[in-house]
Amino acid sequence: MADLRNNFVGIKSPNPFWLASAPPTDKAYNVERAFKAGWGGVVWKTLGEEGPPVVNVNGPRYGAIWGADRRLLGLNNIELITDRDLYTNLREMKQVKMNWPDRALIASIMVPCEEQAWKAILPLVEETGADGIELNFGCPHGMSERGMGSAVGQVPEYIEMVVRWCKQYTRMPVITKLTPNITDIRRPARAAKAGGTDAVSLINTINSIVSVDLDNFAPNPTVGGKGSHGGYCGPAVKPIALNMVAEIARDPETYGLPISGIGGITTWRDAAEFLALGAGNVQVCTAAMTYGFKIVQEMITGLSDWMDEKGHKTLDDITGRAVQNVTDWQYLNLNYIAKAKIDQDACIKCGRCYIACEDTSHQAITNVVNGLRHFEVMDEECVGCNLCVSVCPVENCITMEQLPAGSLDKRTGKVVDPNYANWTTHPNNPMARQAAE
């Protein structure tokens, strides 16, 4: 049976599934229930400095994007960091860690960008027995307007500076949480590494307004007739998160930097994709808020079963396996050719592939054969774009089939290059040419 035990920068947990810093980790009651359900670790909801408590809105805090079946695709929130007293949180963290010594407990922290503020809170957190800290440089709303959160995360120099302070004033591993609200995610990751961070976690939420109430003409969620930008999360952000994780994993300047992957993880497959792109573990929030803490049991079983089926014995067998196959566009194999093929037995004759191709693509699908409604791909027109695959409502009804070397491409009239499979040494590959020169 696959071994899901996780060792992330020396922080051990029985599985790679952690709850991200968010409402589900705001108090001992929640965290205890999460551990009982099977979560391997939690990142406690972000702590602030000692003093007057943070005040959250007493009204709607979430906006949502739904699919046609009312499935939650994206969640926007305007909630701030914990509004509970710092010392109450610290006492509860200490007790939970004592009760669950085999689980990972990480303290998320956000205080003003001043050395004394970080120096003051770190010993308090360390006394709880927490396994590490996560620096919240990602929150895009509320706190960022006060010079914290993404206001720091968007300035690499600030990231490096704060990470250095934390490495100076604590023995705990430091995980730097990055904001996606930036042009090039590699720059803050490089800064965090330069500061000595033990790991990075990403992505935090994306700055957003999800909808507008057209009766009140105010953004949702609406509080007293007004709305504000918030942080967007959930399944809809997963593609953005995967790309940013991959960018850090394959960047020569951050190569080997441990990554905790976050962003839209709902199933074991989502988690496996993050691991394959270089994440050492994953953090989950929206899925737990949508389906409850026990969803982790499906994730654990699913990942374990898949690893058994594929012969992967430990998480190390899959971590980073896909990174080598992520490349820049200029290095893609332009000699590779594939054509769409429709399974006539599976086809329900809805015509969506035909409409999409005829109106918006390459007019490569016919809709009538021998006077009957029939959809078939014309190889001489198909460029292999796979739009038809994307719009087809029947899974695996339309597939892409690679043309073998030496066959005739009816569209171009050329024989498929017999050397295209050896793209690493092909003369049309810029990297191969550079190596040869």
Image (cartoon, helix red, strand yellow):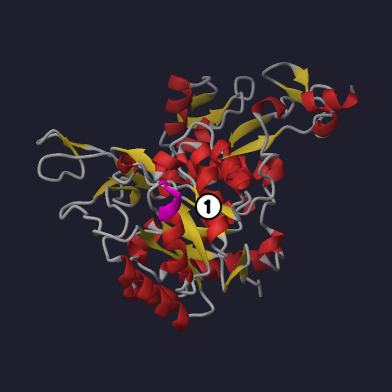
Q: In this view, does 44 lie to the left or right of 397?
A: left
Q: Name the residue under label 1.
A: 165
Look at 70% across and 39% down and name the residue there.
252
Q: Is residue 314 left or right of residue 222?
A: right
Above or below residue 168? Residue 255 is: above
Look at 60% across and 33% down and name the residue there.
340
Mark 1 residue type: Trp
Look at 58% across and 41% down and name the residue there.
191
Residue 114 within the segment the image draws in magenta: yes
Q: Nearer the viewer, residue 183 or 169?
A: 169
Q: Element at badge 1?
A: helix
Report whether residue 33 is seen: no
| Range of residues picked out in magenta | 113-117
Number of callouts: 1
Above or below residue 328? Residue 359 is: above
Q: In which quarter of the image is the C terminus?
A: top right
Residue 342 within the segment the image draws in magenta: no
> Where is residue 418 shown, x and y percent of the image?
84, 28
> Where is residue 170 shown, x and y percent of the image?
54, 62
Q: Nearer the viewer, residue 352 or 135?
A: 135
